[in-house]
Image (cartoon, rainbow, N blue to C red):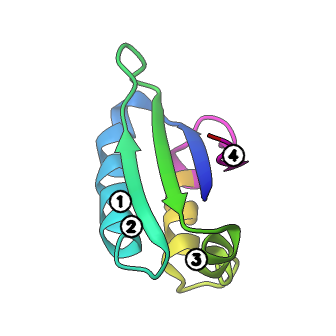
Amino acid sequence: MYQCLSIVHVDPAKRDVLIQAASALADLTRQEEGNLSYDVLAPEGREDLVILAERWDSEEHFQAHVAHADEEGDRVFEFGKLAASISTAPPDLYPCKVLY
């Protein structure tokens, strides 16, 4: 099992825009082969953060999901472009192997 956590630092005034785009990406990603879950999280008391928590059957499934993330038109690319335009800092990305 493989998981990726992305912590996005966002302008609180634009947080709802990011949550809407992340939710649309989550709906599509949940249909991909090997995706177990894709959650959009809003930490309590932190209006400047949105956390994306993805869980996959394997690292290979995750890599397939992001294989074209550097190509314009790819949904991961387009989400990243939007996120970058309203973020206050680069995202913190934590790809993780699930140990237990």
Q: Which residues are magenta?
A: 84-99
Graded by Cα atoms within 10 Å as few (under 14), some (14 to 19) or many (20 or more), the crowding at tag 2 reads: some
List x then y, in percent, for residue 46.
43, 19
Query: Cα distance, mark 1 to mark 4?
Result: 18 Å
Q: Amino acid at mark 3?
A: His
In this picture, residue 87 sits left or right of residue 70: left
Secondary structure at badge 1 equals helix
Circle nearer the viewer, 1 or 4 = 4
Q: Amino acid at mark 2?
A: Leu
In magenta stretch: residue 94: yes
List x then y, in percent, for residue 34.
49, 75
- Give the mark, 2 or 4, whose residue is nearer the N terminus: 2
Q: Label 1, on which residue?
A: 21
39 or 2: nearer the eye? Answer: 2
Graded by Cα atoms within 10 Å as few (under 14), some (14 to 19) or many (20 or more), the crowding at tag 3 reads: some
- Give the mark, 1 or 4, whose residue is nearer the N terminus: 1
Query: Cα distance, mark 4 to mark 3?
Result: 15 Å
Q: Label 2, on which residue?
A: 25
Graded by Cα atoms within 10 Å as few (under 14), some (14 to 19) or many (20 or more), the crowding at tag 4 reads: few
